[in-house]
Amino acid sequence: MESKKPEENKLWTQQEIDLKIKEFDDKIEAAKRDDNTTNVSPDTIKVEKGVFLKDKAKDYDKAEEVLWDALTTAVGPNWKLEIVFEILQMTIHKLEV
């Protein structure tokens, strides 16, 4: 049986959520400044931020905004499909079908 990471079951406070979002924003800016010399692209970090907002912070409106932004700059059909499926899953979860 797989052991879950402590972060998976954690109850997030607003201060912790804000700190995590700032951390994501800093990573995105650093990836843009590095001009993709790192292994992580800004789009990847945007998707991670969107998934965090969706799954952990439960801020669906902001998560949708971040994921749509990532979709407009994503490269490659597989990556775009992954983002669309995240948005679709969130929409179904919100029962806005």
Image (cartoon, rainbow, N blue to C red):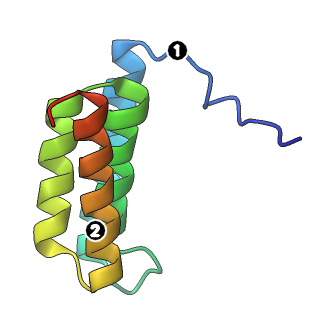
Q: Which residue is mark 1?
A: 11
- Counting other residues with Cα less than 10 Å from the Cα at mark 1, is it few (<14), some (14-19), or many (20 or more)? few
Residue 91 seen in this snapshot: yes
Q: Which residue is mark 2?
A: 43
Identity of the residue drawn at 24% across and 49% down: 87
Please indicate whether residue 34 sits to the left or right of residue 8 in the image. Answer: left
* Marking on residue 69: none
Mark 2, secondary structure of its residue? helix
Examine the rendered structure and indicate whether residue 77 appears above or below residue 22.
below
Q: Nearer the viewer, residue 86 or 27?
A: 86
Task: Where is residue 58? Give x, y as percent.
Answer: 32, 25
- Counting other residues with Cα less than 10 Å from the Cα at mark 2, is it few (<14), some (14-19), or many (20 or more)? many
User: Type of residue at label 1?
Assistant: Leu
Residue 31 seen in this snapshot: no
Q: Exactly how many numbered labels are in the figure?
A: 2
Examine the rendered structure and indicate whether residue 58 appears above or below residue 25.
above
Identity of the residue drawn at 29% across and 62% down: 83
Task: Where is residue 48? Give x, y as percent.
Answer: 39, 53
**Distance between the alpha carbons at the discs numbered 1 and 2:** 27 Å
* Residue 74 image-quadrant placement: bottom left
Task: Where is residue 66? Give x, y as percent.
Answer: 18, 49
Q: Considering the image in quadrants, where does the N terminus appear?
A: top right
Mark 1, secondary structure of its residue? loop
Task: Where is residue 47? Give x, y as percent.
Answer: 32, 57
Q: Nearer the viewer, residue 43 or 15?
A: 43
Q: Residue furthest front?
A: 97
Mark 2 and mark 1 in contact (Cβ < 8 Å)?
no
Q: Considering the image in quadrants, where does the C terminus appear?
A: top left
